[in-house]
């Protein structure tokens, strides 16, 4: 029986179960796992970028397998699907295709792998822009349109895409418009030596989660609604986000600043981080912690500009203003 969530503490419990399951399978990535969970509960999507063999695909699969396997519903939506992007892929390989049934003389829609709760898109920059754009509607609207007919995706629908930043041969860099669909772009650096040793020690041994409980997709969907309702976002926090965006747009160090979409997506992300840190309100601490993964990949920078320094500079004034307003209100 699927539990009914009614309090923030219950939502934290769901997040804790997910965290425990993923950490069991992914060693030395606690900070990345936390950001992935924030994106999941914030109804966003994640782009993972790093060198081959760094654990990007393992992390995505661990999250997918942390959910209870439910029978495909009447819409044909599975719990977890993986798509390997290659140069010869077609949009219909992602969204699905209309086929003609000779037995019934009728056309029917055969659903593609995008009809899943958790979708792993491996090496997203290895396929053509035409296929990449097939994900745009799915990520933004949770639906796909094939032959002028729209098909609804799962309410949970969460995309984790991976790409290799260095091996550029045969790749198609994502345009800014598509990068803007991702709540976070996360770089997975090499894990520390102690964690790497644990990976080697565990190699070849069965890693069984044993009593670690899984999570129902309905719990995450309910959790999203609860945190939107119960985690307070003050007008001062909203003003701080607008001020940060203005600073990033007005500087001569950018050709193009961040979008309004990034500010809208930032709200549930900040609420989720507040929830995971035991608060029922968003604070300046949440903004400082999430500003870089939210904004850095959404800008077109001038040559030689470092995104981390730019975001850090843009934060100074708005965060100070938010802190003063918070102290004044107290």
Image: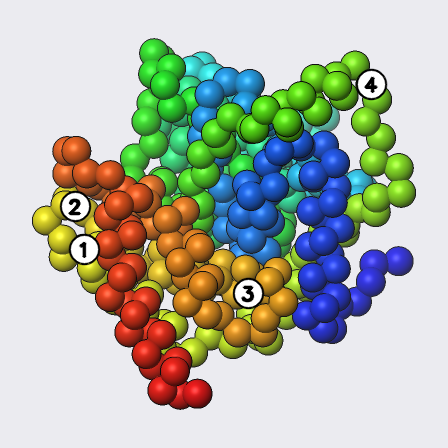
User: Marks 1 and 4: which is nearer the front?
Assistant: 4
Provide the secondary structure element on which disc 2 rests.
Answer: strand
Kindly indicate whether the residue at mark 3 contacts the one at mark 1 (C-beta within 8 angstroms).
Answer: no
On screen, 162 above or below 290? above
Kindly indicate whether the residue at mark 1 contacts the one at mark 2 (C-beta within 8 angstroms).
Answer: yes
Q: Which mark is residue 249?
A: 1
At which x and y percent is residue 257? 22, 51
Q: Quadrant of the C terminus?
A: bottom left
At which x and y percent is residue 328? 36, 87
Left or right of 234 in this view: 63: right
Provide the secondary structure element on which disc 3 rests.
Answer: helix
User: Marks 4 and 2: which is nearer the front?
Assistant: 4
Q: Which mark is residue 205?
A: 4
Residue at horizontal 35 percent and vertical 57 percent from the top: 261
Q: Earlier in the sequence, mark 4 or mark 2?
A: 4
Kindly indicate whether the residue at mark 3 contacts the one at mark 4 (C-beta within 8 angstroms).
Answer: no
Provide the secondary structure element on which disc 1 rests.
Answer: helix
Residue at horizontal 44 percent and vertical 34 percent from the top: 187
Residue at horizontal 49 percent and vertical 42 percent from the top: 46
Q: Earlier in the sequence, mark 4 or mark 3?
A: 4
Tell me if mark 4 has few (under 14), some (14-19) or many (20+) residues whose alpha carbon lies within 10 angstroms of its own.
few
Q: Which mark is residue 201?
A: none
Q: Residue furthest left?
A: 252
At which x and y percent is residue 58? 63, 27
Separation of marks 3 and 2 at Cα, in angstroms: 30 Å
Tell me if mark 2 has few (under 14), some (14-19) or many (20+) residues whose alpha carbon lies within 10 angstroms of its own.
some
Provide the secondary structure element on which disc 4 rests.
Answer: loop
Q: Which mark is residue 274?
A: 3
Separation of marks 1 and 3 at Cα, in angstroms: 27 Å
Report if residue 233 is visible in the image. yes
Q: Which mark is residue 254?
A: 2
Q: Earlier in the sequence, mark 2 or mark 1?
A: 1
């Amino acid at each position: 029986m699927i539990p009914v969530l009614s309090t923030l503490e219950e939502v934290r419990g769901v997040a804790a179960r997910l965290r425990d399951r993923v950490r069991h399978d992914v060693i030395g990535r606690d900070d990345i796992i936390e950001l992935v969970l924030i994106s999941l509960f914030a109804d966003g999507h994640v782009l993972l970028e790093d060198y081959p063999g760094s654990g990007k695909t393992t992390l995505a699969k661990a999250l997918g397998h942390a959910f209870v396997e439910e029978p495909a519903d009447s819409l044909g939506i599975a719990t977890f699907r993986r798509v390997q992007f290659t140069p010869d892929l077609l949009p219909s390989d992602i969204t699905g295709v209309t086929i003609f049934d000779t037995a019934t003389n009728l056309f029917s829609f055969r659903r593609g792998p995008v009809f899943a709760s958790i979708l792993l898109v491996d090496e997203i920059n290895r396929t053509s822009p035409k296929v990449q754009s097939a994900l745009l509607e799915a990520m933004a609207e949770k639906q796909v349109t094939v032959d002028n007919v729209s098909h609804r995706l799962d309410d949970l629908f969460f995309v984790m895409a991976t790409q290799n930043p260095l091996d550029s041969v045969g790749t198609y860099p994502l345009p800014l418009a598509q990068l803007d669909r991702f709540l976070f772009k996360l770089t997975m650096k090499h894990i520390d030596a102690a964690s790497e040793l644990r990976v080697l020690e565990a190699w070849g041994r069965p890693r069984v989660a044993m009593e670690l409980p899984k999570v129902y997709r309905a719990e995450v969907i309910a959790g999203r609604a609860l945190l939107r309702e119960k985690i307070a976002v003050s007008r001062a926090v909203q003003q701080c986000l607008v001020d940060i965006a203005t600073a990033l747009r007005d500087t001569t160090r950018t050709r193009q600043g961040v979008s309004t979409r990034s500010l809208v997506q930032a709200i549930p992300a900040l609420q989720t981080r507040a929830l995971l840190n035991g608060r029922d309100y968003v604070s300046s601490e949440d903004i400082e912690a999430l500003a870089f993964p939210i904004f850095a990949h959404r800008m077109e920078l001038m040559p030689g500009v470092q995104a981390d320094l730019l975001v850090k500079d843009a934060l100074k004034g708005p965060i100070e203003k938010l802190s003063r307003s918070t102290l004044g209100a107290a």
